[in-house]
Amino acid sequence: MFKYLVGVCFTASILLMSCQTAKKDIPSANPTPVAIAAKPTSSTALKLKPTKELVLENGLKVYLFRDLSLPRFSINLLVKVGQRNDTLEKVGVNHLTASLLEQGSNQYSATQIADKIASLGSDLSIAPGDEYTLVSIDGLSMSVDAIVDLFSELVFKPTFQNEEITKLKKEFTAQLKKVQDDASQVADLGLNAFLHKGTPLAYPSIGTEASLKKIGKSDIIKNYLTNYRPNNSILSIVGNISEDVEKKILDRFKSWPARSLKPAVAAIKPPADNKKMESQFKKDLVQSEIRVAMPMIPRKHPDYLKLRLINEIFGGGFVSRLNSKIRDQLGLTYGISSSLDLGLDQGYMYVSTFTKNETTQQVIEQINAEVAKLIDEGVTAKELSSAKNMVLAQFPRALETVDRVAFNFMYLDFYGVGSNYLYDFQRSVDRLTLDEINLAIKTHFSLDKMKIFVLANPSVEKSLAAIR
C-alpha cells in the first residue's frame, strides 16, 4: 500500500510476503516451552537452517536461529498493532507510541539511550506500519548482555515523557507540511484517502495536524498497555549466541507481563461506492501523477503465488506489458510499474506512473486497455515461463542471510501462511499451469472495481471528465 512513512522503515523488498494474523488468547498454564524442529517437506524444498519454535508462558511466540558464522546477533520483535488499530479521531497514535519507545525509559533518557546504542555499536530500528510494528536491534555477540538489557528496557518500560511527545508531534506536523511539496507522495496519500475513506488507513500513518492535537499521553499509554504485550507479539532471536545466553534472553522475555487482548479489529473493506476516479488539481504542475488500484485478495489466499506471477508479467518487471507498451512503444512516461500488496483482510495491485499533462488521459486509457487485454486474453506460455524464472531467481535474496530467514518466518506466522511456503516455494511455482494463471486473472481482475487517482494541473480537468 502506498504510504508516507516517517522514521526508520523495514525494507519490505527483502521479503516475499505480506501477511495475516489471528487473535491469540493467553495460553493456559504450560510451563515448559516446546521446541519444534522445522523440516523441509519435499526433496525439492529449500533447505533452511534448523529452527526452534517456542511459546513462552506469557504467550510470546519465539523463533530461535543459531548462526555461528559471525560474532553478531539480533533480536526482532513483531507487535501485532498498526495504523489499522488507530481510531479515526486519533490517527497516528500507534506511530507516536512506537517512535517514543527509544525516547525514554525508567532507567534512561532519550539522550542516554542514543549514547548507549552508539557505545555498544548497535543498531536500533523501529518501524510502525499499517498492520504491525517491528522493533529490532543488533550488535556484537560480546555485548549481548548489555544489548538485551537495553532492548528489554525500551520495550518493557517506556515512560512517554510529555516533552518527548510534544517534540515528536512538532516533527510530525512539520513533515506533514513538507510532504505537500512532493507530488508523488501527495498522489500516494490521495489514493489512500480514496481507497480507504472512513477508515484510519485513509490518512498518513503519522496522523494529521488535527489528530495529533487530540492525542494525549494517556492515549499513548493506553495503546501501549493494550497492544504491546507478549501475547500479541512474535520474537526472533538470531545469531552467534550460546545456549546459556539463549536461556538468559528467554528468561528476560518471560518476565514481560501478558494482558487480556481486545477483540480483533473488524475487517477493513473497500468502499461500497462505484466511483471510479478521484482527482486533485494543483497549479504549476508540469506533469500528472497517476495511481491505479485494483482490489485483490488477502495475503493468506491460496492464489497468492498466481498473482505474483501475473504482476511480474503485467507491470512488475522491466519487460512487463505496461512498461513495454506505455514507456517503450508509446513514449508516454519514463517509468510505469505495478506492485502487489496483500494484507490481513484484503489486498491491492497498484499501478504507479507519471506523464506530461497533455497525455494524462491517453495514459489512463492505455492502462485501462492493458487491464482489459489481460482479462480478455490472459497471458501466454512464454510470458509465464519468463515470469517463473524471474520470481525463482529473486527468491534466494529473501533468504540470503539468517536474519532474512527469521524475518520471513515471523511475517508468514503473522499472516497465517505457514513456513511450508518457504520450503515448497520452487515446487509451488513450477507446478502452476497456464490455465490456472488465466483463471486467476478472470477471477480477481475487474475493470469495474478499478480505482484511479490523478494529481494534475487544472488544465487537464476537462479531459479527465471524459473518463469518469
Image (tube, grey):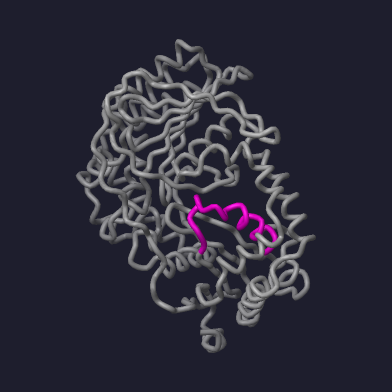
Residue 446: quarter of image: bottom right
Q: Is residue 301 magenta?
A: yes
Query: Quick check: 424 left or right of 142?
Result: right
Comparing 52 with 352, the one in front is 52
Say whether residue 2 is visible: no
Comparing 138 with 390, the one in front is 390
Q: Above or below — where is 242 with respect to 129?
A: above
Comparing 220 with 339, the one in front is 339
Residue 110: quarter of image: top left
Say whether residue 311 is visible: yes
Residues in magenta, as a range = 296-314
* Residue shown at the point (28%, 44%) measured from the top left: 165
Query: Quick check: 251 left or right of 329?
Result: left
Residue 425 in the image: x percent, y percent? 64, 42
* Residue shown at the point (27%, 31%) measured from the top left: 258
Residue 20 in the image: x percent, y percent? 44, 47
Comparing 321 with 103, the one in front is 321
* Residue shown at the point (51%, 84%) measured from the top left: 468
Query: Quick check: 414 left or right of 169?
Result: right
Residue 409 in the image: x percent, y percent? 52, 36
Residue 39 in the image: x percent, y percent? 59, 28
Q: Which residue lies furthest to the top in this view?
A: 244
Q: Above or below — where is 144 with respect to 86?
A: above
Q: Is residue 135 magenta?
A: no
Question: Total number of numbered labels?
Answer: 0
* Residue shown at the point (31%, 23%) measured from the top left: 30
